[in-house]
């Protein structure tokens, strides 16, 4: 019979099966998986087959994303799944179904795993949200699959001499930190097929041309030879962004500076601000491009284009300075000559030869003579031919050196500039794009 004790409104049955304690299997000092794998029976601080040949460790990688490429820091950031394959007979177990066992990261700390690291990496981490992104799969014959999800930022030495028309090659290098090739043989599990990438991988400034895998031996003078695996990828920069942001604005500024060649040379308030504005705009473009680039010691392709464009803009300002100066000198000489020569309008001077023509006026010059006609003053132009070989004593004669330097047609400078500047800049563009494209 069952005895019952009554406490208030509650009845307690002393021999009731409800009160019988069921053993808690989770409190065992060793879990069933650890017992099955005989983890405590072996020293997993040593590699498999210690004292024998090197342990072959196969590797394959799946690239999840290629996040950023930085020219300033000379690095790239990549997120990938890296998987290691090896055989450790110490982890073999008996299985009637011949199925593998899968574990999370907690068991990884109790067994031997390859000590891989990324050569030339600046920072890297294993994802831990919502738990450590680590998987361990053990097969009955002792084969092991160890997978991690890792994000790594690694160095990439870039040659920017052709920027932004460049192609860059970067590589992620994987190596064992402690085990030389005598203890660990690292290799790509499936050869060239060991690397797979997500089809949706894309970058804003680069076109990913190809991924490939290679392996080499790396030597350290103090420790020896190590197997090193390479993930190499080639990137070609998109040029359209830089055409819109750099090349087109610079070209338009150069073309804008040519407008001054069609403006009257006497319009100083129009031509001077136009030249200064284009020079300052080109300086701003150059400063903006260099601010987003590393301070390299060599000249980049974009530097050549911008600085040549800057020189063309600067020369357009110098051209107007030359036109204005020569115009001023010519006006002063004309004024002095008018003061020294008598007014000879309407008559032929004894030392003058030939007839009037506009061509002669352009070659030898003209003098102003003010006549009053019908109460109005108007300026007439006459041609003066001086016979240099004879009649040196003719009144009003001026030395030949004055005539040789006085009649400089300053308008011709603008006329020539309208052809020379666009032609030279077009030739430069043809050479530039043929060399870098």
Image (cartoon, rainbow, N blue to C red):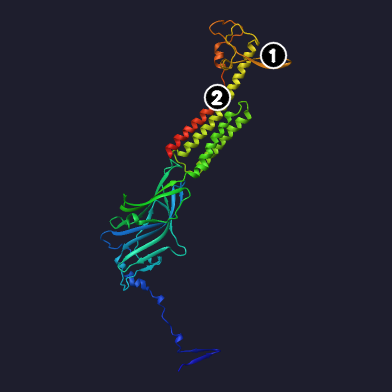
**Quarter of the figure that contains the C terminus:** top left
Number of other residues with Cα within 10 Å of mark 2, as a class: few under 14, some 14 to 19, many 20 or more: some
- Please state the horizontal and vertical placement of residue 260, each as a whole percent of the image: 58, 30
Number of other residues with Cα within 10 Å of mark 1, as a class: few under 14, some 14 to 19, many 20 or more: some
> Between 286 and 226, which is closer to the camera in this rendering?
286
Q: Secondary structure at mark 1?
A: strand
The answer to whether 374 is drawn above or below residue 229 in the figure is above
Discs 2, 1 touching: Cβ within 8 Å:
no
Q: Is residue 393 left or right of residue 212?
A: right
Residue 375 appears anywhere in the view: yes
Residue position for label 1: 371
> Which marked residue is nearer to the observer: mark 2 or mark 1?
1
Residue position for label 2: 413
How far apart in space, not on screen, are marks 2 and 1 (Cα)? 32 Å
Question: In the image as oriented, which residue stretches furthest toward the left?
Answer: 52
**Quarter of the figure that contains the N terminus:** bottom left
Question: In the image as oriented, which residue stretches furthest toward the bottom?
Answer: 1
**Residue at 47% across, 35% down:** 429
Count of numbered circles in the view: 2
- Please state the horizontal and vertical placement of residue 335, each as a whole percent of the image: 63, 16
Residue 157 appears anywhere in the view: no
- Please state the horizontal and vertical placement of residue 132, each as a whole percent of the image: 43, 63
The answer to whether 182 is drawn above or below residue 394 in the figure is below
Q: Give whichever of discs 2 and 1 has the lower sequence position.
A: 1
- Please state the horizontal and vertical placement of residue 2, each as a whole percent of the image: 46, 93
Q: Secondary structure at mark 2?
A: helix
Q: Quadrant of residue 110?
A: bottom left
Q: Is residue 46 left or right of residue 291?
A: left
């Amino acid at each position: 019979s069952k005895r019952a004790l009554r406490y208030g409104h509650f009845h307690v049955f002393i021999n009731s099966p409800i009160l019988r304690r069921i053993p808690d299997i989770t409190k065992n000092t060793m879990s069933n998986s650890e017992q099955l794998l005989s983890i405590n029976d072996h020293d997993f601080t040593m590699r498999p087959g210690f004292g024998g040949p090197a342990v072959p460790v196969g590797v394959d990688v799946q690239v999840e994303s290629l996040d950023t490429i930085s020219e300033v820091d000379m690095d790239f950031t990549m997120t990938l799944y890296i998987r290691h394959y090896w055989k450790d007979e110490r982890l073999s177990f008996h299985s009637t179904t011949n199925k593998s066992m899968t574990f999370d990261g907690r068991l990884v700390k109790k067994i031997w795993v390859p000590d891989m690291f990324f050569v030339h990496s600046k920072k890297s981490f294993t994802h831990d949200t919502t738990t450590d992104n680590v998987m361990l799969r053990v097969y009955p014959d002792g084969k092991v699959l160890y997978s991690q999800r890792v994000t790594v930022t690694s160095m990439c030495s870039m040659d920017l001499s052709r920027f932004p028309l460049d192609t860059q090659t970067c590589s992620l290098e994987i190596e064992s930190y402690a085990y030389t090739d005598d203890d660990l043989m690292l290799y790509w599990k499936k050869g060239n097929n060991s690397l797979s990438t997500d089809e949706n991988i894309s970058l804003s400034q680069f076109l990913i041309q190809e991924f490939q895998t290679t392996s080499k031996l790396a030597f350290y003078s103090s420790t020896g030879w190590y197997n090193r695996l390479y993930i190499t990828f080639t990137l070609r920069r998109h040029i359209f962004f830089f055409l819109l942001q750099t090349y087109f604005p610079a070209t338009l500024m150069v073309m804008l500076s040519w407008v001054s060649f069609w403006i009257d040379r006497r319009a100083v308030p129009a031509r001077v601000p136009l030249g200064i504005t284009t020079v300052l705009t080109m300086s701003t473009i150059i400063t903006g491009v260099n601010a987003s680039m590393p301070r390299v010691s060599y000249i980049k392709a974009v530097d050549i284009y911008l600085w040549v464009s800057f020189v063309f803009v600067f020369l357009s300002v110098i051209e107007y300075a030359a036109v204005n100066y020569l115009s001023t000198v010519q006006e002063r000489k004309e004024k002095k000559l008018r003061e020294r020569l008598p007014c000879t309008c309407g008559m032929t001077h004894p030392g003058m030869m030939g007839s009037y023509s506009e061509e002669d006026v352009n070659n030898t010059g003209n003098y102003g003579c003010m006549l009053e006609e019908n109460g109005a003053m108007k300026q007439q132009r006459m041609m003066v031919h001086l016979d240099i070989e004879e009649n040196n004593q003719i009144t009003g004669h001026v030395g030949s050196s004055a005539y040789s330097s006085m009649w400089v047609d300053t308008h011709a400078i603008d006329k020539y500039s309208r052809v020379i500047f666009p032609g030279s800049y077009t030739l430069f563009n043809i050479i530039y794009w043929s060399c870098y494209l």
